[in-house]
């Protein structure tokens, strides 16, 4: 869901054949603007901790980078924050 000019809230579905677990996610964006920062808020990734807190970054794939540099998948993104909320 778009919540700002370049900001989106993402809602994850539970993994198949699990009891409400979510271990991975995948999404695609198109028609991006060069030099523009985009923000994605994964709103329901609920775990007590995350490897993002230990420095892991999401894997990204750029069709243009793959064509230009022959490098497709890479660890990317910045200002990654993982928040745990309590009820």
Image (cartoon, rainbow, N blue to C red):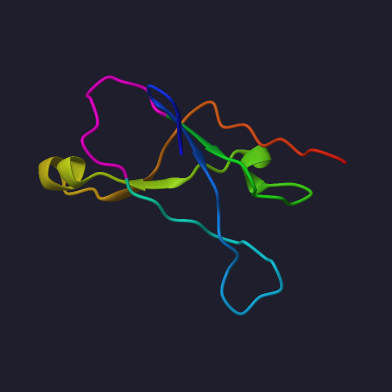
Q: Residue furthest right?
A: 87
Q: Depth check: 73 or 87 in front?
A: 87
Query: Which quadrant would residue 33 be assigned to in this image?
Result: top left
Q: Residue furthest left?
A: 68
Task: Classify residue 68 as left or right of residue 62.
Answer: left
Q: Residue at x 67, y 65 (%)?
A: 21
Q: Does 6 appear in magenta? A: no
Q: Depth check: 10 or 26 in front?
A: 10
Q: x and y percent of residue 13 in the render?
A: 56, 60
What quarter of the picture does the C terminus occupy?
top right
Q: x and y percent of residue 36 in the render?
A: 31, 20
Magenta: main secondary structure: loop
Query: Which quadrant would residue 64 be assigned to in this image?
Result: top left
Q: x and y percent of residue 35 in the render?
A: 27, 19
Task: Classify residue 65 as left or right of residue 9.
Answer: left
Q: x and y percent of residue 14 in the render?
A: 60, 65
Q: Residue at x 39, y 51 (%)?
A: 27
Q: Depth check: 16 or 24 in front?
A: 16
Q: Residue at x 54, y 26 (%)?
A: 79
In the depicted structure, whether residue 21 falls above or below residue 49:
below
Residue numbers of the magenta segment: 29-38
Q: Depth check: 75 or 48 in front?
A: 48
In the depicted structure, whether residue 19 falls above or below residue 76:
below
Task: Classify residue 14 as left or right of residue 48.
Answer: left
Task: Classify residue 38 as left or right of residue 86.
Answer: left
Q: Residue at x 31, y 42 (%)?
A: 29
């Amino acid at each position: 869901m778009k919540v700002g000019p370049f900001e989106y809230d993402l809602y994850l579905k539970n993994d198949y054949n699990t009891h409400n677990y979510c271990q991975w996610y995948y999404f695609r964006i198109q028609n991006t603007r060069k030099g523009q920062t985009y923000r994605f808020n994964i709103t329901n990734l609920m775990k007590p901790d995350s490897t993002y807190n230990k420095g892991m970054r999401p894997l990204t794939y750029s069709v243009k980078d793959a064509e230009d540099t022959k490098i497709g998948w890479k660890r990317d993104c910045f200002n990654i924050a993982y928040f745990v909320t309590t009820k």
